[in-house]
Amino acid sequence: MNVEDLEWFVALAESEHMTRAAERLHTTQPTLSRSLARLEQEIGAPLFDRVNRRLRLNPAGEVLLQHARRGLHELRVATEHIRALRDPEHGTVRLGFLHSVATWLAPELIRGFRARAPRVQFALTQAATYELETLVAGGMVDLAVTGPRPEGEALAWHPVHTEQLCLVVPRDHRLADRARAAVAEAADEPFIMLGPDFGLRRLTEELLARAGVDPAVAFESAEIATMESLAAAGLGVTVVPRPRPHRADPNAVYLPLVDDAAHRVLGLVWRADRAASPVVRRFKDFVMSQEWTAL
């Protein structure tokens, strides 16, 4: 089966439009049509249904797309692996990380490693915990910095950094002059949370449950910075990791929580059943060595 035909099929499946896919691939529509016909003949079945000038994957196409993505990824990994064997100073690390570590932890790790391996390249992806776990499990990302620890045994995990959790309140709040607080002291407050699929939401709910608090959720957001701004505006309280210097909302007060479980552990995640390329393994070993903490 022709690798180019598979790559073009994936592009066509993602765009669902022959002309747009041809433009994306820098080829002509007739050439792309011939590639699809060749692939369908080899498969022995049509791969798309044509609906109102658009192409919709049929069941056979959905099966092929799943395996084509996986196969093309494995081929890219194998190619990089071979290149790295010939020259271990080259290669690409596909690294995912949380939005909340994009301004400090992720850059520190990359900078520290590039000081030792300056020719290694990085392909970066920012996403939520549940999205990163899916990307790692599907082979789209080699490693991810996320938290909390993933469930199950499919993904391996190594802790990297522990963050203190804080209760965020506006400056005129009754707790604002405190040095620290217990989460139970905000039991009657409206809470601002991340969406239900986010790792920090899960941690916050577990923390509140341990304290016997059944929170009234006033707002849900997809960004920690938005949660902090809403709390600063007096629209509720929220729980977030202690902000980095100069990153805190100036109109909010961050009270370190005294609860035993008031912390978030960030860790490195990878697929437990997949051998990493030499350059990915080298970066993983660097992160796990704790050498970066001195940077």
Image (spheres, grey):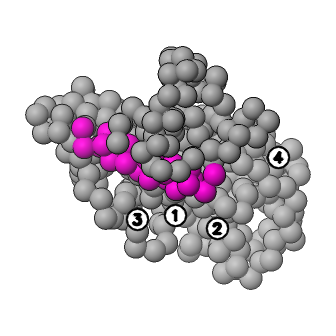
Q: Position of residue 193 (x, y in %)?
A: 75, 58
Q: Secondary structure at mark 4?
A: helix
Distance of label 1 from label 3 (alpha carbons): 12 Å
Sequence-wise, the earlier of marks 4 and 3 is 3
Distance of label 3 from label 2 (alpha carbons): 18 Å
Q: Residue at x 78, y 71 (%)?
A: 185
Amino acid at pointer 1: Pro
Mark 2–mark 1 contact, CB under 8 Å?
A: yes
Tell me the magenta residue range: 58-79
Return the mark for residue 281: none
Amino acid at pointer 2: Arg
Q: Residue at x 84, y 55 (%)?
A: 219
Mark 4 vs mark 1: give the one in front. 1
Q: Secondary structure at mark 2?
A: helix
Instruction: Judge left or right: residue 244 versus residue 231.
Output: left
Question: According to the image, label 4 marks what residue?
Answer: 230
**Residue 78 colored in magenta in the image:** yes
Amino acid at pointer 3: Leu
Distance of label 4 from label 2 (alpha carbons): 20 Å
Question: According to the image, label 1 marks what residue?
Answer: 148
Sequence-wise, the earlier of marks 4 and 1 is 1
